[in-house]
Image (spheres, rainbow, N blue to C red):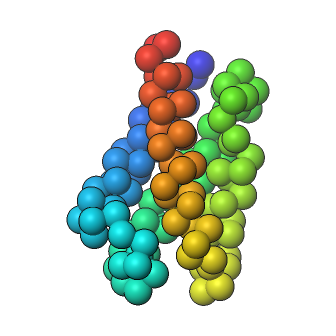
Amino acid sequence: MKNKDIIILRKILEYCTQLEEACDMFNNDYGTFINNSVFQNACCMCILQIGELCKVLSEELRIQENTVPWKEWCGIRDIFAHQYSNLDYESAWDTIQYDLPELKKAIGKILEQF
């Protein structure tokens, strides 16, 4: 793995942590998420940044660590960036609750190897 990839993966973990902090701040409540633009923006910006960082990981890493759905994370960035005003907040919440913890765990395992 390239040193650049390690730096990027660590940055992704930082955004995962920031997103968790936002959820903790708002008691990880879906109703609050739906009705609070500050909560939405905090979470969605982190997801957007994670997707952006996934795009700059080396192709070598994405092929080697193929259990992570890198392409989907890159795609979610495009949705959050270009269709934000029409964002499906239920899907965003599912990403926060289910996909993000899996991503964080997978990246942690990748980094443990190095």
- What residue is rendered at 34% in x and 48% in y? 17
Q: Quadrant of residue 68?
A: top right
- What residue is rendered at 34% in x and 53% in y? 20
Q: Position of residue 54 (x, y in %)?
A: 61, 45
88 in relation to 56, above or below = below
Q: Which is nearer the eye, 46 or 24?
A: 24
* Total marks in image: 0
Q: Quadrant of the N terminus?
A: top right
Residue 20 in view in this figure: yes
89 in relation to 59, above or below = below
Q: Position of residue 47 (x, y in %)?
A: 51, 59
Residue 52 in view in this figure: no
Q: Quadrant of residue 91?
A: bottom right
- What residue is rendered at 72% in x and 58% in y? 75
Q: Quadrant of residue 42?
A: bottom left
112 in relation to 87, above or below = above
Q: Position of residue 31 (x, y in %)?
A: 40, 79
Residue with the most extreme top position: 113
Q: Position of residue 71 (x, y in %)?
A: 74, 46
- In the rendered structure, the answer to whether residue 108 lies left or right of residue 26 reads right
- In the rendered structure, the answer to whether residue 48 lies left or right of residue 88 reads left
- What residue is rendered at 68% in x and 69% in y? 79
